[in-house]
Image (spheres, rainbow, N blue to C red):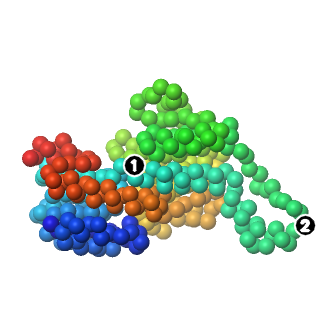
Amino acid sequence: MKLVVLDAATLGDDLDLTPLQRFGEVTVRPNTAPEEVGEAIRDADVVILNKIRLNSSNLAGSRVRLICVAATGYDNIDTGWCGQQGIAVCNVVGYSTDSVVQLTLAMALSLATYLPEYTQYVRDGSYSAGNTANRLSPAYHELAGKTWGIAGYGNIGRKVGMAALALGCRILVYKRTSEPGISCVNLETLCRQSDILSVHLPLNDSTRNLFSADKIALMKPDVLFINVARGAVADEHALAAALQAGKIGGLGIDVYSQEPFPVSHPFFSLREHPRVCMTPHMAWGSVEARIRCLQEIVLNIEAFQQGKLRSCVNQESFSLCL
């Protein structure tokens, strides 16, 4: 069996990919340009990728039968077409929960406590040069008693909620179905009432641009908006404009509609804004999470090799094809 890893660089240089060799010949490509994908996968039986887009334009004519996504989200793959062609698409679920929750909390706490400003005051020598034992400007508030809105209540959103409760926050949840014991609200209420609003939704037709300009306009002027899900679930132009106009209080962003975002992107001009914490899509990528991710991919390939489907996201259409 031939396996191709299309964008190994996105998995980190320190991740040992040798466990894949048990299945056959492995070709590891650090990155693959869009125009190179078709040729790169032509003779592959299994394709492993993180962010590369796969569809009929590059899969047609190949012998690929299994696509393993090194992620939970799979909006970069035409799963329907793959299923119709007898190509199984398998993702990895739950591997990055703790990693993403950690960054979500880090962003919220950093923005809420003005941590960069206070550490810079010490770092640049201002504290040592002063004659006051402490500094309390800019003023900050405790998160206890604040309302933390959570959009998406899967593994990550649920654990963020647990952490928010531990900090003394009240939580509101926006999800498709109500749940006993959880304060579930509609999107408008979530936007209006949240002091911190973190997004943990997949990207699909129903969530694309969910946080549109009119929803952003409903938010409190001091809200901290954190997106660690997918960039396109929010109107990035509207978010940037709202922050610059002082209509929202801060942005914590790890994901973007274009990755990496170009200089023409609305967030490029916000890179040094004091109320912005932007990171390069790294929330999912702790060492532990990446090791778990690879372990799950190995199990997915092993199951497929045995004629079984594991974590298959297009199982229905794939099964109809067989």
Q: Which residue is mark 1?
A: 94
- Residue 8 location in percent, x, y? 34, 69
Q: How far is the residue under mark 1 from the one under mark 2?
A: 50 Å
Drawn side of residue 236 relative to residue 53, left or right: right
Q: Quadrant of residue 171?
A: top right
Residue at 39% x, 46% y is 202
Question: Residue 131, labelled with which disc?
Answer: 2
Viewer-nearest residue: 262 or 45: 45
Viewer-nearest residue: 55 or 26: 26
- Residue 184 location in percent, x, y? 50, 30
Q: Amino acid at mark 2?
A: Asn
Residue at 22% x, 46% y is 314
**Label 2: how many Cα within 10 Å (few below 14, some 14–19, many 20+):** few
**Label 1: how many Cα within 10 Å (few below 14, some 14–19, many 20+):** some
Against 187, residue 34 (above or below) is: below
Farthest top residue in view: 180
Q: Quadrant of residue 133?
A: bottom right
Q: Is residue 37 among the parts visible in the rendering?
A: no
Which quadrant of the rendered structure holds the N terminus?
A: bottom left
- Residue 268 location in percent, x, y? 52, 65
Against 154, residue 35 (above or below) is: below
Residue at 39% x, 43% y is 207
Q: Amino acid at mark 1?
A: Gly
Q: Is residue 86 among the parts visible in the rendering?
A: yes
Q: Secondary structure at mark 1?
A: loop
Residue at 48% x, 51% y is 98
Give the mark, 1 or 2, whose residue is nearer the N terminus: 1
Q: Secondary structure at mark 2?
A: loop
- Residue 113 location in percent, x, y? 70, 53
The mark closer to the camera, 1 or 2, is: 1
Drawn side of residue 241 relative to residue 287, left or right: right
Drawn side of residue 123 relative to residue 272, left or right: right
